[in-house]
Image: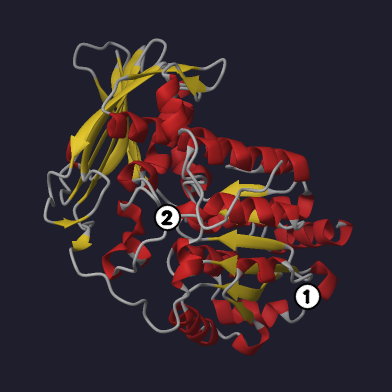
Amino acid sequence: MSSRRDFLQKSALLAGGTIMASALNNQAFAIFKNRIAPSDQLNIGAIGINGMGWADTTAALKIPGVNLVAICDVDKSVMDKRMADYTKMGYDASKVRRYDDYRALLDQKDIDAVIIGTPDHWHAMIMMHACEAGKDVYVEKPVGNSIGECRAMVAAQQKYNKVVQAGQWQRSQQHFRDAVDFVQSGQLGNIRTVKVWCYQGWMRPAPVVQDSAAPAGVNYAAWLGPAKTVPFNSSRFHFNFRWFWDYAGGLMTDWGVHLLDYGLLGMKSPVPKSVSALGGRFAYPDLFEETPDTLTTLYEFEGFNMVWDSAMGIDNGSYGRDHGIAYIGNNGTLILNRGGWEVIEERQSKSKVAKPFVAQSDNGLDKHLENFVSVVKSRKLEDLHCPIQAGAHVATVAQMGNISYRSGKKLEWNDTEGVFTDHAINKQYLMKEYHNGYKLPKV
């Protein structure tokens, strides 16, 4: 691994102290990579490449020395499309091995790291098997589809001591970090409420349609995996898996892990004492979904409350923004989202904390993959921007909100034992039931 560390240092010098991958096109990188010694290159495999898995992969390919050597997806048409995209980027797709079984990909010896972009219900098992197989892992958010899965993933990383980065790329975006520094400077005064909201006008479930046979080239049994066996339905497949409990957790886990994460970071990542959630299928009662399209969740912390507010089909969220985090203090309110941040001063405040809007100026996804590759090469796990422990923490908080909603109860959390005080809730919701003979690896 020393040669890989040497290469990372050379790449940093080449870029003037940072990896400037996003400044060059993919064809330029393909040419540059041909001049890099094989011992200095990092070979990756991508598992689940329909959406963010492919976005993550293309971001990784901007980094000198990173090579795509294998892909895996249960849908042959997706692999065909991505290899056509790969060819257009200037690469030779014939050198990339294809799989529809991720375990076969993990057996490929020349793969150093994998990117996991499958539906959420597959994240835990694939990540744990990848660590067991000696691979480093970049796993999409939310890292687990239950609190129990999150814990098992942390345990696997600790057992095998692999690099595991959660795909919460906002942690690598500078303006988010700058905003948190301001929050923690104390200039806002006592922060009594943190508002986190996600209004997504473009997001809507698919229509109710009849079950059907899976499309040709789709290994539907592999797509279901540990989830309950149900007939194929096109309105539950690909992007729309997000709206069904067996596979995901709706907007709360899809966007919540990004936004709640910074609410927690700004307040130094505490664990809530209680959670209460109300919502329902108010926007699209006639479309195909199980998760709520409208949800309000109140988290009680020591000294402040945090509110999660989400809605599909609406863009006009708090402060005129469709998503964000607001830290509301006695002296002022800091409003933060992917576009930038600003501080609005309280009219009666004498502290003069107002700060004009600061726009984002970097690509968080590119930087997040750069951070992952850097740590894979350096083996300095403490340098990861979002290690599995951080991803598991915020996924757990998001799952707590969903569990409160699904149970219809205000729930108290026992932080010492890491469970709810209601044992019936723990039994029903803490860990997903696995089906079809699947089991998580023991760690």
On residue 228, the disc is 2
57 lies above or below 341: below
**Viewer-proximal residue among 157 and 262:** 157
Write the residue at 23% across / 56% down. Answer: 203
**Viewer-proximal residue among 427 and 275:** 427
Task: Name the spot of residue 212 as percent of width and height, x first.
Answer: 28, 75
Q: Quadrant of the C terminus?
A: top right
On residue 36, the disc is 1
Amino acid carrying label 1: it is Ile
Write the residue at 51% across / 43% down. Answer: 171
Does residue 161 show up?
no
Task: Name the spot of residue 19 as percent of width and height, x first.
Answer: 64, 59
Q: Secondary structure at mark 1?
A: loop
On residue 286, the disc is none
Task: Name the spot of residue 229 as percent of width and height, x first.
Answer: 41, 60
Q: Secondary structure at mark 2?
A: loop
Q: Calculate the distance from the C-alpha at mark 1 to the C-alpha at mark 2.
A: 47 Å
Q: Residue furthest right?
A: 2
Does residue 325 show up?
yes
